[in-house]
Image (cartoon, rainbow, N blue to C red):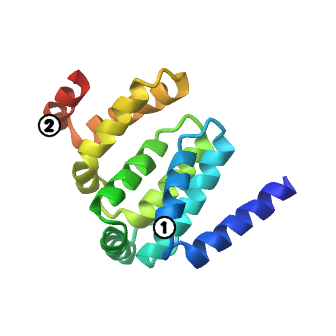
């Protein structure tokens, strides 16, 4: 356990000191960690991803539940800054992975994903509409993966998308699912 703690602290220092300049090398590993079989690795990846995104976005990961107007403004600025640094496609891919993690089967993973999501996303339905094609692509990949846990996560995520965006989203999702 102490080795894990030291490794995590080292990872956080690395992400904080080199994340902005070398995100293209760090980001793929963190994204891969979001789909790891071990929940501890998924939580660690989410923590480091949160550090990276907050570093790029210029915000601090807020573990509180209260969304003040200032929190919303900070999240909007962070999203804009993240899009400028990562590029729109990378941003959509990262946010899709983060949104999928909110539906994880492990409670600690869901909680970590929620904290990071709330830090960098101000209006969930608007962001969901923006990332929907990429997110649905991720969901379809997980549904087809044959891995029971990933299939369950994808199913929960798809249900959550429909719940958040309503039935109006179905015409956009069903053609992708058919293909």
> Residue, x 18% and y 33% (percent of image)?
167
Is residue 54 found left or right of 90 in the rendered image? right
Q: Are marks 2 and 1 in contact (CB under 8 Å)?
A: no
Sequence-wise, the earlier of marks 2 and 1 is 1
Q: Nearer the viewer, residue 152 or 87?
A: 87
Give the class, few, some or many, for how many residues have Cα within 10 Å of label 2's Cα (few <14, many ≥20). few
In this view, the mark in front (2 or 1)? 1
Name above or below for residue 179 compared with residue 113. Answer: above
Question: x, y (%) of residue 41?
Answer: 65, 47
Res 65 seen here: no
Callout count: 2
Res 29 seen here: yes
Q: Nearer the viewer, residue 66 or 121?
A: 121
Is residue 46 found left or right of 69 in the rendered image? right
Is residue 143 found left or right of 12 in the rendered image? left
> Residue, x 27% and y 35% (percent of image)?
162
Query: Hey, which quadrant is residue 4 in on the image?
Result: bottom right
Name above or below for residue 37 compared with residue 152. Answer: below
Name above or below for residue 10 compared with residue 40. Answer: below
Question: x, y (%) of residue 21?
Answer: 49, 76
What's the CA distance linking mark 2 and mark 1? 36 Å
SS at mark 1 in the image: helix
Give the residue at mark 2.
Answer: 168
Give the residue at mark 1.
Answer: 23
């Amino acid at each position: 356990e102490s080795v894990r703690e030291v490794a995590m602290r080292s990872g956080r220092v690395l992400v904080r000191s080199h994340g902005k300049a070398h995100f293209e090398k760090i980001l793929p590993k963190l994204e891969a960690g979001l789909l790891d079989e071990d929940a501890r690795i998924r939580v660690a990846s989410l923590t480091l991803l949160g550090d990276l995104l907050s570093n790029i976005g210029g915000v601090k990961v807020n573990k509180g539940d209260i969304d003040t107007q200032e929190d919303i403004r900070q999240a909007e600025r962070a999203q804009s800054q993240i899009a400028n640094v990562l590029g729109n496609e990378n941003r959509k891919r990262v946010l899709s992975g983060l949104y999928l993690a909110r539906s994880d089967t492990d409670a600690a993973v869901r909680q970590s994903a929620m904290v990071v999501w709330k830090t960098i996303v101000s209006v969930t339905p608007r962001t969901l509409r923006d990332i929907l094609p990429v997110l649905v692509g991720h969901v379809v990949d997980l549904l087809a993966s044959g891995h029971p846990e990933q299939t369950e996560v994808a199913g929960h995520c798809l249900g959550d998308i429909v719940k958040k965006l309503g039935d109006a989203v179905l015409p956009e999702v069903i053609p992708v699912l058919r293909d």
